[in-house]
Image (cartoon, grey):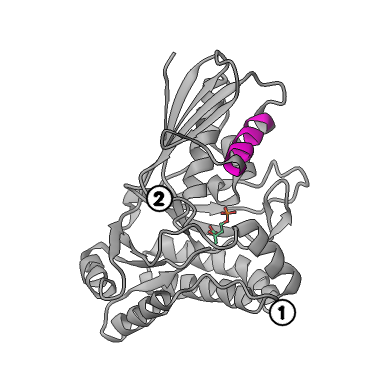
Amino acid sequence: MAVATAVAHPNIALVKYWGKRDIPLNLPAVPSLSLTLDRYTTTTTVHWGNVSEDSVWVDGQAAAPAFRKRALHFLSVLDARRPSCRIETTNNFPTAAGLASSSSGFAALALAALAASGRSMTPAEASVLARQGSGSACRSLWGGFVGWSMGIRPDGTDCHGYPISRPDHWDVAMVMAIVSSDKKSIGSTQAMIRTAETSPLYLPFVEQARDDVIRATQAIKDRNLDTLGTIMESSTFKMHASMHAAVPPVMYWKPATVACIQTVLSLREAGISAYLTMDAGPNVKVLCLQREAQAVQAALLHHVEHCEILKPGGDPTVTIHE
Ligand code: PMV
């Protein structure tokens, strides 16, 4: 029984995952593709045994009941007969605000729990485990550009992330306009269920996802920002349009979200190759070349107080303490 710490970076989807074909296993209705970010991290330590009772700590405070339950259940997925465990986790960026904290969160928890419990798994197997905590977490097992294949097996053992290219493949940046750091109004699983069940626009999103991933993968290999950005925006707007047409609507946007969207479109008219994406929250993330990132940031700062430039990030790391 040991103690281990894992550090993982969040990822932002360029071709979006929205909707599940199996809810308990987090099997997606679509394939997707993402970029892992540098600087933002989740650091998670797991004590596997040698503690008198289960406990979960977030930023040094006892975790809220819902998160505590979710995190401990995740350890029981790994080992139904596990000993009592202590989980300590901290993010250096806002949690549950559409900044992909669940992706780095469950990737770090999976890796720390595997190491602390003395199990060894391939990255693909660890990705299958992380996916069961939060779907997008299966892509945070690698740095750089990462895909997530749907797989065909009902048990999900072939549904995991796979690396596409290393972080230094391409000097792109993701400029994060933080419209709000508040927790999201509706969690992604409930929002996905409502969209799939009620939105007439959901099917076109699903039908085009496979082609979007194939074309985006080629654009990454070719370092073709205009092609990749066009596919990313199309995937984003198809996803959000399908949410907006759900009953009742799933609306994450705020007025400043729309102002940031308009700004990105204007930047393109002015000759800057900047393309936007959004997740289950109001924040706008803009993909551009690193050499143009400061111009993009300056334009977005007219509408938001906080705007940060992130670059492609690396693989997660794991340390075993005893
Ligand atoms: O991993 P979840 O359940 O938080 O879902 C995330 C879904 C999006 O962030 C909106 C899109 C994606 O592909 O990450």
Of residue 170 and residue 265, the one placed in the foreground of this image is 265
Tag on residue 200? 1
Q: Position of residue 75 (x, y in %)?
A: 62, 30
Q: Which residues are magenta?
A: 66-76
Residue with the mark numbered 2: 144
The stretch drawn in magenta includes residue 152: no
Is 209 in front, or is 244?
244
Q: Position of residue 202 (x, y in %)?
A: 68, 73
Q: In the image, which disc is placed on residue 99?
A: none
Ligand 1 lies under 8 Å from the Cβ of mark 1: no
Q: Position of residue 287 (x, y in %)?
A: 36, 66
Identity of the residue drawn at 49% across and 53% down: 96
Q: Nearer the viewer, residue 236 or 303?
A: 303
> What kind of residue is marked 2?
Gly
Asked whether residue 272 is in view, the answer is yes
Residue at (67%, 69%) from the top-left corner? 206
Q: Main secondary structure of the magenta part?
A: helix
How crowded pointer 2 is (Cα within 10 Å; few <14, some 14-19, many 20+) is rated as many
SS of the residue at dot 2? loop
Q: Earlier in the sequence, mark 1 or mark 2?
A: 2
Looking at the rendered image, the quarter that the N terminus falls into is top right
Crowding at dot 1, Cα within 10 Å, few <14 / some 14-19 / many 20+, comes out as some
Above or below, 87 against 158 in this view is above
Would you identify the image quadrant in which residue 114 lies? top right
Residue 90 position (above or below residue 116): below
